[in-house]
Amino acid sequence: MAAGIGAAAAELAAARVMARSDALAEISATPGQLTRVYLSAEHVRANQRVGDWMRSLGMTVWQDSVGNICGRYEGLTPDAPALLLGSHLDTVRNAGRYDGMLGVLTALEVVAHLHVQQRRLPVAIEVIGFADEEGTRFGITLLGSKGVTGQWPADWLTRTDADGISVAQALRHVGLDPDRIGEARRAHHEICAYLELHIEQGPCLEAAGLALGVVTAINGARRLNCTFSGEAGHAGTVPMSQRKDALAAAAEWMVAVERLTCESDPHLVATVGRIDSLPGAVNVIPGQVQLSLDVRGPQDGPLAALLATLLQQAQAICARRGLQFASEEFYRINATACDDEIQQRWHSAVMQVQGSSIALPSGAGHDAIAIAQHWPVGMLFVRCDRGISHHPDESVTLSDVASAIRAYCQMVESWGTSA
């Protein structure tokens, strides 16, 4: 394993990351909050700021045709394939300052470490600030990373935001040409792998007392609209034994969803997040209940098996109570496995830094989902306070960021000995 960056230098690098996170947080559409959406004036300013930091490290800098900010630190040969590092610079509304940004800024510190030493690797290092991972403005996620992989559907250009502005119009407004979005696509031979550092957005590392964890996979997900149909009736006149109460059936099922999921693979999760009871009157037995079901897991097989069990349980409850159950899937994304070899490289780097290493899946989506369609990917999680994310209270410590930078440098430098 390569020597990496020293502890003292990593502390200084972490301090720069924290200061730059604060600087980027000031680039916001909402005073007193952090909101920075795709193809906004704030997006352009953030790209310019990150581009300036890239240039200070001797990188060649460009903004691609979908709005990603890109910087390249050359390898030993000018045509070397690139090890791609990065994350996203866009945010949700009223966001925290580390989701996405931490991955870009720590990647810059990896380059800074090499630049100070005037060192080149057999591979080039490219850092990318993806333009739109969150999908806040247009309701489409991964626009930046899918631009890099050439996965933009033609109808994306016609999608509109809340003000009726289309993606095509927004591209033109910031000086980009919607007819040239295909130019963002990178050829397969240009990139050898993608690494993404990200806050965990969950409590597992904190519970384990560890700063860093290696991601095994990004969870797949299934989202369904479910309906329990019974019979409305007078709340005072229908005996309990003769009721077809849709809400009581749904409540029984929700408890079963929790129980059955807890009894299954510990990495599987299921959530009923929305519920509507009709007719919704205090003196009427609910005749219909509509609710959502979100099931996620790092492997598609166990995820599908759990979903089938949950739906069978709903049917059984309704059969016993004399009701009807229906469900319709409206969203599906398969699990994305991180590359086995890259996981092992991450584990080795993390072991060097904190003496032990933990493996865990990601319950949230990331740009790595799109990139994994073309190149091997690997992710490193950094502990965040109470697992809070997508919220102004999102927080990391300087010491944890320093540990992350040390592991990141170890990881990238390993390509210098075993590319």
Image (tube, grey):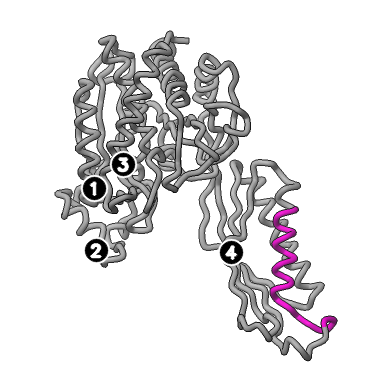
Q: How many marks?
A: 4
- The magenta region covers 240-259
**Residue 253 visible in rendering:** yes
Q: What residue type is labelled 4?
A: Ser
Q: Distance between the residues labelled 4 and 3?
A: 34 Å
**Residue 419 visible in rendering:** no
Residue position for label 4: 292
Q: How far apart are marks 4 and 2 (CA)?
A: 30 Å
Q: Where is residue 216 in the image (x, y as percent from the top left)?
A: 56, 33
Ranked by sequence position, the earlier of labels 3 and 2 is 3
Ranked by sequence position, the earlier of labels 1 and 3 is 3
| Quarter of the rendering occupied by the C terminus | top left
**Near-viewer residue (354 or 76):** 354
Q: Residue 215 vs residue 172: left or right?
A: right
Query: Which residue does the image show at 31% across and 60% down from the upper left?
Result: 155
**Near-viewer residue (256 or 340):** 256
Q: Which amino acid does label 3 sit on?
A: Ala
Residue 25, numbered label: 3
Question: Up-down: is 409 above or below 299?
Answer: above
**Near-viewer residue (49 or 360):** 49
Query: Which residue does the image show at 78% across and 73% down from the upper left?
Result: 319
Of the two numbered discs 2 and 1 in the rendering, the one whose residue sits closer to the viewer: 1
Residue position for label 1: 42
Residue 165, numbered label: 2
Q: Distance between the residues labelled 3 and 2?
A: 25 Å
Ranked by sequence position, the earlier of labels 2 and 1 is 1
